[in-house]
């Protein structure tokens, strides 16, 4: 293949990536990444007013997380760039916010270390599984973990006692830091359980693949 053909192929690939970057789901993902420093900046100020707006921005980021995946599937805009950026944006905003909350005294360092370690382990296993042509679907435990984390982090970001009422029910003053910690610790249980299940499925899939490769195709029988 000559140099001109190689240049044309590279130009076509760049054009495709640029077109992928401009579709709505990926633009929402980019917006979620931009929201990360905004959340951390507001948290750094630390006043109740700033924490309220930090929680609002984080909640908006969580909404875009659900919306961009739904739009990508509905409009047939699932792309390689989106598959890379979407989980990256999720992990950056969750881990970045949790790490920022540790020195503020709103969450224990050990819980954050466990959650980050779990994410690194599962990401590594998914990379290995993908390289082996193995697809393992996300379980319900992982989805429950994500929901609890999102709500728990919003509570931790708010970070102050608030008077809490729902209709005619008056719960008085509720310290949202305690609520957030409870949700994060609960999500940690689901997180570790789903990680164990994923590792078990991964080992079973690898064993099945190795067994099939060892046994080889079944010989045909001539009539």
Image: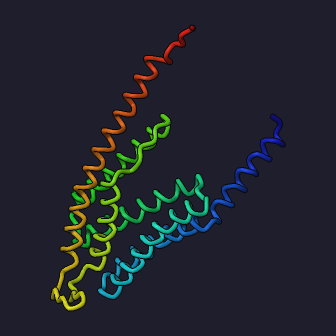
* Number of marks: 0
Q: Residue furthest top?
A: 223
- Place of residue 126 in the rendered image (x, y in percent of width and height, measured from the top left): 42, 44
Q: Is residue 22 left or right of residue 92?
A: right
Tell me what residue is drawn at x 53 percent, y 54 percent: 83
Q: Quadrant of residue 205?
A: top left
Task: Look at 18% across and 88% down and name the residue there.
Answer: 169
Compared to residue 218, the image places residue 124 above or below, namely below
Q: Nearer the viewer, residue 27 or 142?
A: 142
At horizontal 21% and vertical 61% (from top left) the residue drawn is: 186
The single residue placed furthest to the bottom in the displayed view is 168
Name the image colouring.
Answer: rainbow
Quadrant into which the N terminus falls: top right
Task: From this view, report whether residue 43 is shown above or below residue 73.
Answer: below
Q: Position of residue 61 (x, y in %)?
A: 44, 72
- Give x and y (percent) for residue 96: 37, 64
Which x, y percent locates residue 75?
A: 61, 63
Residue lying farthest to the front in this orientation = 223
Figure check: 97 above or below 159: above
**Side of 173 relative to 120 (left or right):** left
| 138, above or below 222, in the image | below
Quarter of the rendering containing residue 59? bottom left
Which residue corresponds to the image point at 36% horizontal and 78% vertical from the top-left? Answer: 55
């Amino acid at each position: 293949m000559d140099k001109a053909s190689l240049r044309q192929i590279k130009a076509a690939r760049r054009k495709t990536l640029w077109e992928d970057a401009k579709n709505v789901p990926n633009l929402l993902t980019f917006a979620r990444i931009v929201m990360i420093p905004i959340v951390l900046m507001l948290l750094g100020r630390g006043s109740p007013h700033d924490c309220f707006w930090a929680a609002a921005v984080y909640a908006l980021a969580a909404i875009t997380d659900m919306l961009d995946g739904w739009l990508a599937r509905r409009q047939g805009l699932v792309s390689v760039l989106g598959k890379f950026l979407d989980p990256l944006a999720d992990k950056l905003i969750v881990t970045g916010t949790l790490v920022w909350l540790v020195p503020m005294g709103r969450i224990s360092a050990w819980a954050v270390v466990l959650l980050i370690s779990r994410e690194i382990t599962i990401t590594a296993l998914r990379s290995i599984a993908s390289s082996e042509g193995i697809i393992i679907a996300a379980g319900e435990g992982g989805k429950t973990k994500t929901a609890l984390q999102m709500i728990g982090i919003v509570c931790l970001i708010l970070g102050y006692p608030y008077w809490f009422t729902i209709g005619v029910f008056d719960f008085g003053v509720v310290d949202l830091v305690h609520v957030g910690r409870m949700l994060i610790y609960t999500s940690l249980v689901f997180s570790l359980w789903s990680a164990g299940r994923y590792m078990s499925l991964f080992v079973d899939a690898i064993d099945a693949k190795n067994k099939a490769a060892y046994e080889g195709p079944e010989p045909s029988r001539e009539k």
